[in-house]
Amino acid sequence: SSAAKEGWPETVELYLGPTNSGKTFRALRFLAEKGSGCYAGPLRALAWETRDAVAARAAESWGDVAPRVGLWTGEESEDADAPILCCTAEVAPAGGDVLVLDEVHWCVDPWRGHAWTRLLLAAKAGRYRHVRICGPAEARPLLTKVFEGAADVKVHNTQRRSRLHFEAQPIVDLRGFLATTRNEGRFVALVAFSRAAVLSLAAAAQKAGARASVVFGKLPPEARRAQLDAARAGRLDVLVCTDVIGHGINLPLDDVVFAETRKFDGQVKRDLYVWEAAQVAGRAGRGDRPGRCWHVGKYGANKTLLRDAVAMANGDPVEADTGLELSRAVLAPDLGALRQLLPREPSVLLLPRALAQWRLELEAEIEEGAASLPAWVRGGDLSELAERLAKLAAPDLVPSDVRDALGVADLWHLARLPVKNAHFDEIAKAACLGASARATAPLASLAGEALEDEVQRLGDLLIAARRFPGVVAAHAKGTEDALDAAEKLYLDGSLRIGAGVQTSIDTAGLCKTCGRPKPANAKPSDQHCRRCFLDNMRAKQEAERLARLGEAPVEQPGRGRA
């Protein structure tokens, strides 16, 4: 086609609309029928779900000769050379036959948006033959700029298949409400934003007689997938979760109940944006079934926010600021871009300066409207990357002679590892020294949050081990055996956490310090009874007073568990 000759993809189709409007379904059907290409989305759990869906559709289209469907995320790969690949956006290939880019509004995220922008640039350059992009209607102006000049861009304005209703009256008796929904056979998602709140609400749901389980941030993907599978199979009445369900995960929900509408976003605790709440609320009512959105007033859920969120989920006009600002996609440099800014052979010592220079030059080009730069991009948040590069350049973490044993490409990869900042120093030091990180603590001796933390740490080590296999060498003799042993240990830990979910729910109503029941009017996020809360507050104030005086606090004996 003429479009292909000019460097554009042969076809570009945009599926834009609210939740439950069939956007991704239609794009994936095209991918399955073509039999070659890539799906890219924001979550590992979503990549898993999509792989199963595409494999089923490919079997319908191709029968016995259906193409294989692989999986590739930051944590794992299965059949990664398959004709069809389901990925998280960060690891999606830069070219191929079909690209299905899901949740495109992530391109403006300050920290992860560059992964979507990279794929948009690849699509614009024609490195994919066929492009299918899914996202909210608000993304249309930005995507129009991205594909300006393309021969033929089809826009499908999808409509929600069923109405979502907002229940203005707050739920006063949560247990009574959940007992009613259970008796009526309605499947409910109960939304909160801390581990303690999620577990406490699950305990309340079970006391109401509901079959309830949980999904929260520290739950390993394997355990999380087991809970989602149970929900889809009809083995749950209530799923208590964070906003993870708002990122495209499909569940047969009838009702979404917000116990809380404030979350910690990694930097500050804030109200949900309207669009974030809309993504979550919109999961209620799948297919042609209407859904309902509720709130629990006594826990502080914001009624006005949720009313606007429901309107947005329905595709109705919203006068309030939705928080979804989609004017420019986030751009981040690759190592090649930084090499061009360095006066001599690249060194990690110079990368922090080059990163700062790249950001300044980008801002200047954007302000000047430079022709070499797409008019629809901006710089993202590079503070975490800059901090990591500075650590790798300083002798505090690793001696200079040891650090120099790694090439600049290895150090750049190390700085960009998708691991928790709490684990970065340990991983970086082990990788630079060619040594192993601390051996994993005996998992059988851990429980609850301590077990979750240790398994999360092991998961980050496995991510690093793809490039630096020695970081897990302490788990067994020989690199291959070590990696295999670490993966088995991680799976064992994930299974232990999954099996221990019920224990965590059972103890959620107890004070974390003394073990006695928390008061009936405690908020879901409260971890202590009133007596222990006051004792802890007084102890903290006394410690602060003594610190100001330069004295050591006198350790008081604890009451312990009753």
Image (cartoon, rainbow, N blue to C red):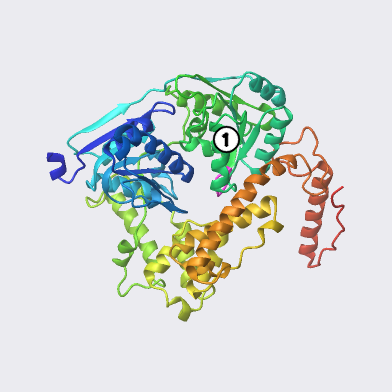
Q: Residue at x 82, y 51 (%)?
A: 538
Callout 1 environment at 10 Å: few (<14), some (14 to 19), or many (20+)? some
Q: Residue at x 48, y 73 (%)?
A: 432
Total numbered labels placed on residues in the image: 1
Residue 265 belongs to the span the image colors magenta:
yes
Quadrant where the N terminus is found in the figure: top left
Question: Horizontal and vertical percent for residue 349?
Answer: 41, 73
Question: Horizontal and vertical percent for residue 211?
Answer: 66, 31
Image: 503 above or below 363: above
Task: Write down the quadrant of residue 342 in the picture.
Answer: bottom left
User: Which residue is more in the foreground, 103 or 227?
Assistant: 227
Left or right: where 139 falls relative to 212: left
Q: Give the magenta part as a residue range.
A: 264-269
Image: 295 above or below 545: above
User: Which residue is more in the foreground, 383 or 400?
Assistant: 400
Circle 1 SS class? helix
Q: Main secondary structure of the magenta part?
A: loop
**Label 1 amino acid?**
Ala
Question: Horizontal and vertical percent for residue 410?
Answer: 40, 68
Task: Write down the quadrant of residue 143 in the picture.
Answer: top left
Q: Which residue is mark 1?
A: 230
Image: 12 above or below 411: above
Residue 482 belongs to the span the image colors magenta:
no
- Asked if residue 223 can be seen in this view, the reply is yes
Question: Horizontal and vertical percent for residue 557?
Answer: 87, 58
